[in-house]
């Protein structure tokens, strides 16, 4: 094998990995998992949890206190 062929195959492998990762990340089935992961930094902060719950109620059509 020549070096050009090896480099071409390496590029192809990286391209396939990139496309696979992009499909996995932007899959609608993963949204709930990623939404939960975005809240992990606030898991130990009760005030942040109250704000998140209040915002969720406000955006879902609930009444403001």
Image (cartoon, grey):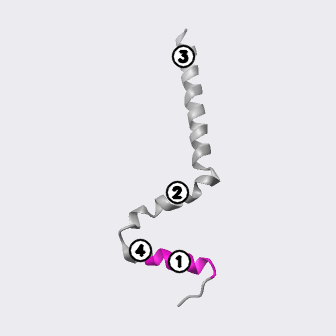
Badge 3 density bin: few <14, some 14–19, many ≥20, Cα 10 Å: few
User: How many angstroms separate mark 4 from mark 2 (CA)?
Assistant: 18 Å
Horizontal and vertical percent position of residue 51: 46, 77
Q: Residue 48 carries which label?
A: 4
**Residue at disc 3, secondary structure:** helix
- Vertical placement of residue 43 versus 20, above or below: below
Report the residue at 42% width, 62% height from top: 40
Report the residue at 62% width, 77% height from top: 60
Horizontal and vertical percent position of residue 50: 44, 78
User: How many angstroms separate mark 1 from mark 3 (CA)?
Assistant: 53 Å
- Asked whether 2 or 65 is in front, the reply is 65
Name the residue beneath numbered marker 2: 34
Q: Residue 14 carries which label?
A: none
- Asked if marks 2 and 3 touch (Cβ < 8 Å), the reply is no
Query: Which tag, 3 or 4, sits closer to the chain's start?
Result: 3
Instruction: Write the start and end of the magenta stretch as one range.
Output: 50-61
Query: Which tag, 1 or 3, sits closer to the chain's start?
Result: 3
- Asked if marks 1 and 3 touch (Cβ < 8 Å), the reply is no
- Vertical placement of residue 36 versus 45, above or below: above
Report the residue at 53% width, 77% height from top: 55
Query: Which tag, 4 or 2, sits closer to the chain's start?
Result: 2
Q: Does the magenta stretch include residue 52?
A: yes
Badge 1 density bin: few <14, some 14–19, many ≥20, Cα 10 Å: few
Q: Quadrant of residue 56?
A: bottom right
User: How many angstroms separate mark 3 from mark 4 (CA)?
Assistant: 52 Å
Query: Which tag, 2 or 1, sits closer to the chain's start?
Result: 2
Viewer-side label of 2, 3: 2
Name the residue beneath numbered marker 3: 6
């Amino acid at each position: 094998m020549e070096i050009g062929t090896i480099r071409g195959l390496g590029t192809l492998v990286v391209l396939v990995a990139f496309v696979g990762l992009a499909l996995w990340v932007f899959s609608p089935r993963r949204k709930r998992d990623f939404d939960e992961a975005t809240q992990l930094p606030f898991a130990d902060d009760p005030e942040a949890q109250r704000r998140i719950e209040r915002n969720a109620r406000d955006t879902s059509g609930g009444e403001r206190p």
